[in-house]
Amino acid sequence: MTKTLLKALMTSAVVAVSATGITTGAASAAECIAPANPGGGWDFTCRQIGKIMFDIGAVDKPVQVTNMPGAGGGLAYGTVVNERGSDEDLIIAASSATTTRLAQNAYAGMTADQVRFVGAIGADPGIIAVAADSDIKDLGQLVDMVKADPGSVAFAGGSAVGGFDHMKPLMVLQKAGFTDITKVKYIGVDGGADAITQTVGGFTQAMTGDMSEVVSFLANGDIRVIAVLTDERVPGFDDIPTAKEQGFDVVAVNWRGLYVPKGISDAKFDEWAGKLQQVADSAEWAEAMKANGLAPFTKVGGDFQSYVDGLVADIATMSKELGVTQ
Amino acid sequence: METLANLALGFSVALSPYTLLLAVIGCFIGTIIGALPGLGPSNGVAILIPISFALGLDATAALVLMTAVYYGAMYGGRISSILLNIPGDEPALMTTLDGYPMAKKGEAGNALVLSGVASFVGALLATIGLILLAPVLARVAFLFGPAEYFALYLLAFCTLGGMASNNQAKSAIAACIGLGIAMIGVDSSSGLPRLTGGNLHLYDGVDFLVAIVGLFAIAELFFFIESHGKGSSIGVVLDKVTIPWKYIKQTFPTMLRASGVGFVAGVLPGAGASLGSFLAYMTEKSIAGEKGGFGTGAPRGIAAPEAGNNSAAGGALVPMLTLGVPGSGTTAVLLALLMTLNITPGPTLFRDNPDVVWGLIASLLIANVVLLVMNVPMVKIFVKILSVPAWVLLPGVTMISTTGIFALTGSYFDLLMLVGFGVLGYFLRKLDVPTVPVILGILLGGNMEDALRRAMTLSDGDPMYLFSSPIAVGFWVAAILGFVAPMFLRGILKKPEGHKD
């Protein structure tokens, strides 16, 4: 009977060991930290980029993916800054959410200059959508409604108040000269699909999110996307106008990219940038982007750092006005 | 007819020796994951996602494996609830209330078989519901806004008092402790952290599994130490394992009702399996009245939550597949799995990827049958675990669950919290305050608050918005009845005998 128990214990030990085995990579191979649970955007970034780097020969050994969820990426950020500040074999998945939280001081005092941003190689275009049967025809009309009576339009989005989805309509409204942004109604729900459900159900008037979140609903005719927040129309969605061409010069994309620890050598930084560029140029990445609704968006190396600095400054200003900065 | 043709397509995709083998392996792993406190279905599936990548499984094979693990975990959770009074995962919480007393009466085998059959009935009916009603039910989600969700959670809280304890006030205190703990973390309606003390580890709030393992397993360990191993409540009498046809027959209507309640709770995005098993249990308890003997090892008290949570698990797949809105933590992980397989669930999934949808449904049916067949003979093995002396068993379970918790985030902070919850659980039990409402407070409190805050944002703070739809008003009426009725009934009916550990 004890034998049975032993067996049970052994089995569970194996399960537990294999579970932790995933989270602790061998030291020699490069490691990619996804600061979230398996399955999310950051996890996707690590797995796809890591896999392609190995497939195209940019790295010798498969990249180990470590999931380190917590505090919206803050735990991983803290670990990199405090404990692995000069680890040359470490890359960490990042996105617009990373810079938004840094701008809002949501990583317990840590700042964007405590790591080095290597680059972004793909982006999920930001969108603003309404229910298919909504009276709202275009972005201009939506903006006018908010200007006339901010209480008449409620937005739903997949991020918390002050998150990137919340920022998107605010950026548009600011361009339109509406400055009283705290009056704009926004509810943060559990993901883009939930935001669509609330909008189709008539509880909110518009949803803000990413293109990849709405594709299926768009095909089913549940919603209409009234603006996409990119420089140019997105290939494959050519009938959706940009905010820019409707007179609101706002570009808000959820980029997917990487950062590395601050303390690595410039040569190593350039090496990672080169590898990332190789991935960006590969056919495999083009395929992965297409399958996941990402649009091309390549900014690698020094270019990217200045883009990130600009983003952080913009969002920090807006967040102060909203009162979400800690 | 079309449904049958689709189902045939599904089985043609899912039924091969290879996938059957995966289903059996998945069911086995899932049962163990579910049975181990500290590893719930969502972590189990999350842990296995990278493994399925490493094995290079294709979409169908990965889905079969994951759904087998998912359903397996829903089955497995009951085992430690019944045998150890420690819920294996959050949906199995309610099963401790009657399952453990029944095991103490010497009917551990009966309790396990009965709950296994109830799980099967719940899961089977939910899968049938999914097949027949998914496209229709998907529209239900559009009817639920913040006001409706708030009223639904309120209903759950209002019926809490009548549960678990003879003292409503103590249940209420316990629920409030849970609600308080649920407030920890980043407030989604302002983006600001609350009650975190600036500690990043607390930004995501308190994980239910940490609370469950702490309040049940660690607290049990403290009692064990205090009494030098004598006062432990572990150590139930063994019986011969036979199939308790009498109980199965007797509880069959219960299983059907509980499956219905659970399925509806599962279909609503954001409610999930825990609410399903809770509502199923409370419904049966109120139908049975004070004479039902709920809380003292009533067979119906085992059948209801198990049928309820398994059918909620199936129901939660409806919004996940048709809208891409996960109805529970585990479906959120399954959703992530589908997306990494380059399949985006949503309204067009049934049309564009019939092989995936029907393959999934077929694998659910396969997993369910495999689990029933596997679980009845396995009961003997599980029951034998009980003959292991408590001084080996209890530290063993604690060690495994601690490892499981550590594997969640890989941080020692959760382990400190685990001990903290153990201390809390110890004192609560000393004071005869039930711990189940604490967990439910943590589980449902955050959602209830979010719903209220969203409703207030949308209505500019007008409380009348909460009563703005017939659905919401219906829940309010039920909630008030659920809260008030026991007070009056209590005077009329005799108090039931409370069970003592």
Image (spheres, coloured by chain):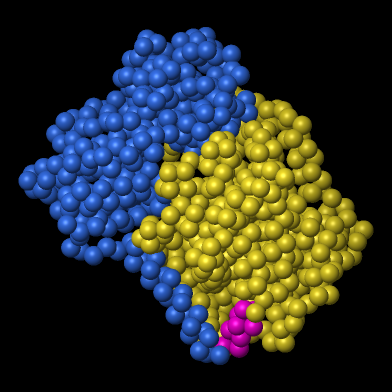
Chain colours: A blue, B yellow
Q: Is residue A118 left or right of residue A65?
A: left
What are the residue bounds of the magenta stretch? B378-388
What residue sits 56% from the left and 52% below the top?
B359
Q: In the rendered image of this protein, does residue A249 appear above or below residue B205?
A: above
Q: Determine if the magenta segment contains residue B384.
A: yes
* Rendering coords of residue B487 (x, y %): 83, 53
Q: In the rendered image of this protein, does residue A194 appear above or below residue B87?
A: above
Residue A228: which quarter of the image?
Answer: top left
Q: What secondary structure do most residues of the magenta stretch adopt?
A: helix
* Rendering coords of residue B33 (x, y %): 52, 68
Q: Nearer the viewer, residue B403 or B35?
A: B35
Q: Is residue A87 left or right of residue B382?
A: left
What residue sits 58% from the left and 33% below the top?
A197
Farthest-out residue, right? B492
Q: Is residue A250 left or right of residue B64?
A: left
Q: Determine if the magenta segment contains residue B145.
A: no
What residue sits 68% from the left and 28% below the top?
B465
Look at the image and tell me in which quarter the C terminus of chain B lies. bottom right
Look at the image and tell me in which quarter the N terminus of chain B lies. top right
Would residue B59 be visible to someone looking at this image?
yes
What residue sits 34% from the left and 41% below the top?
A288
Residue B258: which quarter of the image?
Answer: bottom right
Residue B115: which quarter of the image?
Answer: bottom right
Would residue A102 be visible to someone looking at this image?
no
The mark tally for this picture is 0
* Rendering coords of residue A309 (x, y %): 22, 31
Q: Nearer the viewer, residue B426 or B319?
A: B319
